[in-house]
Image (spheres, rainbow, N blue to C red):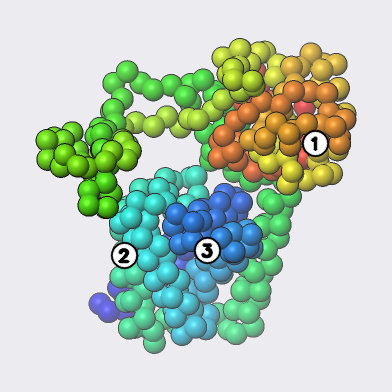
Amino acid sequence: MKNIITQFSRIFVGTLFIISGLIKLNDPIGFSYKLAEYFSEPVFNMPFFIQFSLGIALFLVILEVVLGIMLLIGYKTKFTIWSLLLLIVLFTFLTFYSAFFNVVKDCGCFGDALKLTPWQSFTKDIVLLFFILILFFNEKLVKPLFHNNVQNIIIYASIVFSSLMGVWVLNHLPLIDFRPFKVGNNIQQGMRIPDDAEKSLVEMVFIYKVNGVDTEFTEKELLLIPEDAVFVDRKDKVITEGYVPPIHDFSMEKEGSDYKDQFLREPKLMLIVAYDLLNADKGGLAKMEKLNLEAKAKGYKVIGMTASLPNEIATVKKQFGMTFDFYFCDAITLKTIERANPSIVLLEKGTVKQKVHHNDLKDLKL
């Protein structure tokens, strides 16, 4: 019986680590955004590590895949199980911290393929920790499946494969797009909120300085506020969050006006998406004006979309001789639309028809 439970744990943990790792390896930039969120000031306040988020993300996802394979084939069992235990303890701490303090809404455990709430992520890690502890205490029952030479070949091949996959998706697009802006999806439909959707329950909270200390009062507690208290601020506290559409915070703003309703009716619209113009790939930006002229010649309306400031837009347009206009959209939304900076998205009346990395303009079908 002990052996059956151990072998089940081995297959369950190994398979889940491989699946989780491959999903994130499909989109390591997306996972790096989650790590940057953990490193940010409101969470762990470790801004120095933000610049290394992508490198750390790649290392972790490749490690997940390789450790999962190592466990399944029984390679260096003691090292493998100890590594899995340390990794799951780290993940469990992060997901508990996210859930308890309500800081990172989605840990990105399964990328955009499967969204988990912080408490669901924590529960998943507790389950994994349970099965990894079974492996830890029954390490001798995890036997190798193949001879040493075959084991070595499988592990080295998995490291090479994972590394090549990571490099490829960084220079092109994710192999599978799980995001709400994937090809075939309609942006207007993605923004709609059903009439019967659950509404958010929000409570107004008033902050008053009482004896030098900022103190919160709900509407029901207003009569309890001391007469000498000084009003500081008012905020809305979300008690229960209602339905959030897959696409939100999407805009096409310029000079205070939002043109998304107009542009999303265009039969042929090209979006040149560059969420951060100053840090965008210079070689990619250099190709955009030529692409703009080619697209306009074929009847496309061409606009740029960015979260950069007006003076930054002006600087980049002058540097690269761009003649198309840029419209503002939230940086997180633009990063969700496409990971490359810059990238190209073709729309037909709001429906995504094609998306390409700036390295793959030859594949663009105008």
Q: Which of 32 and 27 lies nearest the eye of the viewer?
A: 32
Q: Which of 320 and 148 lies nearest the eye of the viewer?
A: 320
Residue at image point 70% right, 19% down: 269
First of labels 3, 1 by sequence position: 3
* Residue 332 sits above or below residue 255 on the image: below
Q: Secondary structure at mark 2?
A: helix
Instruction: Residue under label 3, please give it.
Output: 46
Where is residue 223? Give x, y as percent: 11, 35
Residue 306 location, quadrant = top right
Q: Amino acid at mark 1?
A: Val
Q: Which of 196 and 331 lies nearest the eye of the viewer?
A: 331
> CB of mark 3 within 8 Å of CB of mark 1?
no
Residue 207 location, quadrant = top left
Give the CA separation, mark 1 to mark 2.
48 Å
Instruction: Residue under label 1, please give it.
Output: 316
Instruction: Residue under label 2, please give it.
Output: 126
